[in-house]
Amino acid sequence: MTDAADILKDHRDSIDRLDAILVYTLAERFAHTQAVGKLKATHELPPSDPARESQQIERLHKMAIDADLDPEFATKFLSFIIEEVIRHHKNHQK
């Protein structure tokens, strides 16, 4: 049993590290998208860019396939992030 418990602990430690990487990476990404939102508001640009969003989703879809990650999940995840970014951008326009 000890071997299984050790292996489980190692996996959980890795998951915890990866969760931290995800959180800090998302924070960095949102710092950049906040700057973009402010720039768009300053220059009276629309809060969303459907062409860019489509390109990003397509790019992520391909990366997910390459990474052996469910592309549908990856697309849903990025779509959620894009929706949140647009919401932030709209807030800058007020």
Image (cartoon, rainbow, N blue to C red):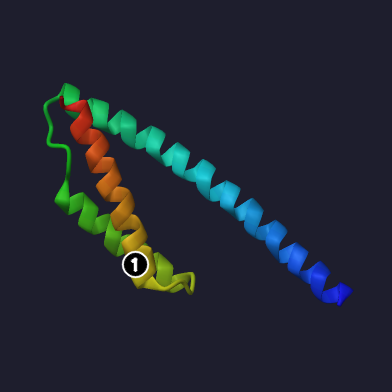
Left or right of 14: which side holds 21? left
Question: Farthest residue in the right direction?
Answer: 2
x and y percent of residue 60 in the render? 36, 61
Question: Farthest residue in the front direction?
Answer: 1
Residue named by callout 1 = 61
Is residue 90 or residue 63 the one in the foreground? 90
Which of the 4 image quarters holds residue 35? top left
Residue found 64% across the figure and 54% down from its top: 16
Question: Farthest residue in the top direction?
Answer: 42
x and y percent of residue 46 in the render? 12, 36
**Dot 1 crowding, Cα within 10 Å, few <14, some 14–19, many 20+:** many
Which of the 4 image quarters holds residue 62? bottom left
User: Does 68 appear above or below 84?
Assistant: below
Residue found 38% across the figure and 38% down from its top: 30
Is residue 48 or residue 83 the one in the foreground? 83
Left or right of 17: which side holds 32? left
User: Does 12 appear above or below 35?
Assistant: below
Say how many tags the image has.
1
Mark 1, secondary structure of its residue? helix
Say which quadrant the N terminus sits in: bottom right
User: Does 56 appear above or below 34?
Assistant: below
x and y percent of residue 6 in the render? 82, 68
Left or right of 74: which side holds 48? left
Amino acid type indicated by mark 1: His
Which of the 4 image quarters holds residue 41? top left
Left or right of 26: which side holds 11? right
Is residue 54 or residue 74 the one in the foreground? 74
User: Does 23 appear above or below 11?
Assistant: above
Say which quadrant the C terminus sits in: top left
Residue found 81% across the figure and 70% down from its top: 5
Residue found 74% across the figure and 69% down from its top: 8
x and y percent of residue 28 in the render? 46, 37
